Image: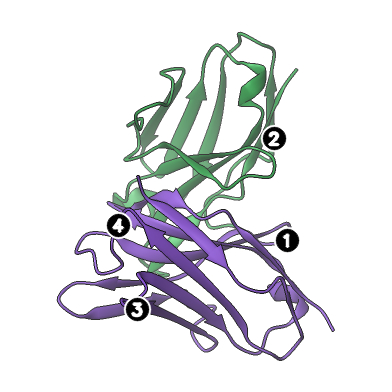
Amino acid sequence: QSVLTQPPSVSGAPGQRVTISCTGSSSNIGAGYDVHWYQQLPGTAPKLLIYGNSNRPSGVPDRFSGSKSGTSASLAITGLQAEDEGDYYCQSYDSSLSGVIFGGGTKLTVL
Amino acid sequence: QVQLQQSGPGLVKPSQTLSLTCAISGDSVSSNSATWNWIRQSPSRGLEWLGRTYYRSKWYNDYAVSMKSRITINPDTSKNQFSLQLNSVTPEDTAVYYCALRDNGYFQHWGQGTLVTVSS
């Protein structure tokens, strides 16, 4: 069981908008630690998608956006494309565990 | 551009030691801002951070609580690389292992991943 909770799966049709939640607690997201998001396509290593809650690395389309509030964070993907299909993970830091933590991952299916 | 190239065996026998190496290009293992991490991924445990090594005037290591008694991460400045050793492995340690550079809290660069199977 991951410290950060994500829905196992989400889906949407091409062009639609989907959101993926990441719920933590007072020892991680709620303590003010940043949330980062990664995209993992089949057979590849995770790739940084959003850092510092809402910032996009260069090369990441502005269809991807992140936000954080309280003990939760969200990743939004607008204008869904077939190439977005894959697994998405949130990551933060936990002061009780004194270490990096990940969400359990969310599988995005583009219908 | 930073690149991380992993090497090491894909099969380890139970009770033996898992050893992997991550060669760094485009940055230095002695960087004063980066930390050098090992992460693993399995269907049962998802993504799991194992530990890190980093240099801030001297060398430091941090390990996940669940790994502390079995893990060692070492830098090798002569070869600009770092390594993972995990002792007394069991089939539960079967996973894809990744090395990764973490800076400002997030993992900017990842190795290609190594599937390590623990089996006799």
Q: Residue at x 25, y 69 (%)?
A: B30
Relative vertical location of residue B72 with respect to residue A36 in this rendering, above or below: below
Label 2 in the same subunit as label 4: no
* Chain A: drawing colour: green
> Would residue B80 be visible to someone looking at this image?
yes
Exactly how many numbered labels are in the figure? 4
Mark 1 crowd level (few <14, some 14–19, many ≥20, 10 Å Cα): few
Whether pointer 2 and pointer 4 mark residues with C-beta atoms closer than 8 Å, the reply is no
Amino acid beneath label 2:
Ser
Give the residue number, with chain letter if any, for mark 2. A9
Give the residue number, with chain letter if any, for mark 1. B44
Chain label for disc 1:
B
Q: Position of residue B74 (x, y in %)?
A: 40, 80
Label 3 in the same subunit as label 2: no
Taking B75 as reference, is A14 left or right? Answer: right
Q: Quadrant of the C terminus of chain B?
A: bottom right
CA distance for labels 4 and 1: 33 Å
Chain label for disc 3:
B
> Would residue A27 be visible to someone looking at this image?
no
Mark 2 residue element: strand
Give the residue number, with chain letter if any, for mark 4. B27
CA distance for labels 1 and 3: 26 Å
Q: Earlier in the sequence, mark 1 or mark 3?
A: 1
Chain label for disc 4:
B
Q: Earlier in the sequence, mark 4 or mark 1?
A: 4
Q: Position of residue B43 (x, y in %)?
A: 73, 57
From the image, state whether disc 4 or disc 1 is nearer to you.
4
Give the residue number, with chain letter if any, for mark 3. B61
